[in-house]
Image (spheres, rainbow, N blue to C red):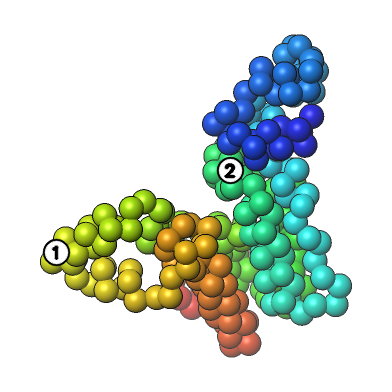
C-alpha cells in the first residue's frame, strides 16, 4: 500500500493523493485502507519511511567525513526521485521511526569519528535540512518567460543592485532541478563541503561551545 501511495504521488503529485484515490489505485474500498493506517497523516508518515528506506546505508570503512557526505548525498538522490518528498518531510509534526533511524545513523558517524557530543549537536543544527538532501534556495529562478525574467532583473537592478549582481554571478544550468537558475547540485555540494571542512577543523582544535557562550 505505501509503495503504491508513493508511486501515485510521484505520478500525480502529493496534492492529488487522497485515501479514496489510493483505494481506487489498489482496487479496494476506502475503508479497507483504515485497517493499515488510521488516517492520511499516518499514511504520509509511512510514505516518508519508504523514501528514507531508499537512502544508501553507510559505506563500510569510510572515514566519518566521507560517510556523512555519502549518506547526505544519497538522501538527496532519494528526495530528488520523489519531488514531493521534501515538502512532506518538513510537514511532519513528529519524527517517524525511519526518520529517527536515519538521524541516529548520521549522528553515530560524527561520534564514531571522534567528534564530541557538543560539536555534533551544533553540526546537526548547522546541517539543518541539508542532512535530508535539500535546502531552501536563495535565488529560485523557477522557469517562466526568459524575456520577462530579464526585464524583471533590469527593473530590480535599480533598487537592488547587489542582489541582482549576486543572483546573476554564478554559473547557471538550464537542466537544473530548480529550472533556469543556479546549478543546485553544485551549490548543495559546495555548502555541504564547507560545513564538513569546518566541522573537521573544529574537531581537530578541540572546540567546545562552552568557550563561545
SS state under label 2: loop
Q: Toward the viewer: 61 or 163?
A: 163
Front position in the image: 146 or 61 = 146
- The structure residue drawn at horizontal position 54% and vertical position 31%, both measured from the top left corner, is 15
Which residue ends up furthest to the right in the rendered image? Answer: 60
Q: Is residue 19 above or below residue 49?
A: above
Q: Quadrant of residue 26?
A: top right
Residue at the outermost bottom position = 205
Q: Residue at image x 48%, y 78%?
A: 211
**Picture quadrant where residue 10 is located:** top right
Task: Identify the residue position indicated by label 2 in the image.
Answer: 84
Q: Which residue is mark 1?
A: 159
Q: Position of residue 108 (x, y in %)?
A: 75, 65
Q: Residues within 10 Å of mark 1 (few under 14, many from 20)?
A: few
What whole-number distance in Å separates the C-alpha atoms at marks 2 and 1?
35 Å
Left or right of 46? Residue 187 is left
Callout 2 crowding tier (Cα within 10 Å): few <14, some 14–19, many ≥20: some
Amino acid at each position: 500500500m505505501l509503495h503504491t501511495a508513493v508511486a501515485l504521488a510521484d505520478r500525480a503529485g502529493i496534492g492529488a493523493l487522497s485515501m479514496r484515490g489510493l483505494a481506487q489505485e489498489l482496487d479496494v474500498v476506502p475503508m479497507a485502507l483504515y485497517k493499515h493506517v488510521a488516517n492520511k497523516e499516518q499514511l504520509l508518515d509511512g510514505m516518508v519511511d519508504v523514501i528514507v528506506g531508499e537512502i544508501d546505508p553507510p559505506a563500510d570503512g569510510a572515514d566519518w567525513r566521507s560517510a556523512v557526505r555519502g549518506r547526505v548525498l544519497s538522501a538527496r538522490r532519494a528526495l530528488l526521485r520523489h519531488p514531493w518528498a521534501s515538502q512532506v518531510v518538513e510537514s511532519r509534526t513528529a519524527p517517524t521511526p525511519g526518520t529517527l533511524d536515519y538521524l541516529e545513523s548520521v549522528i553515530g558517524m560524527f561520534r564514531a569519528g571522534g567528534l564530541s557530543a557538543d560539536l555534533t549537536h551544533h553540526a546537526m543544527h548547522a546541517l539543518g535540512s541539508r542532512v535530508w538532501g535539500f535546502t531552501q534556495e536563495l535565488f529560485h529562478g523557477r522557469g517562466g518567460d526568459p524575456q520577462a525574467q530579464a526585464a524583471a532583473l533590469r527593473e530590480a537592478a535599480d533598487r537592488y543592485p547587489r542582489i541582482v549582481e549576486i543572483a546573476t554571478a554564478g554559473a547557471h544550468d538550464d537542466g537544473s532541478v530548480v529550472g533556469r537558475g543556479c546549478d543546485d547540485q553544485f551549490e548543495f555540494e559546495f555548502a555541504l563541503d564547507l560545513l564538513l571542512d569546518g566541522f573537521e577543523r573544529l574537531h581537530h582544535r578541540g572546540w567546545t561551545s562552552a568557550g563561545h557562550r
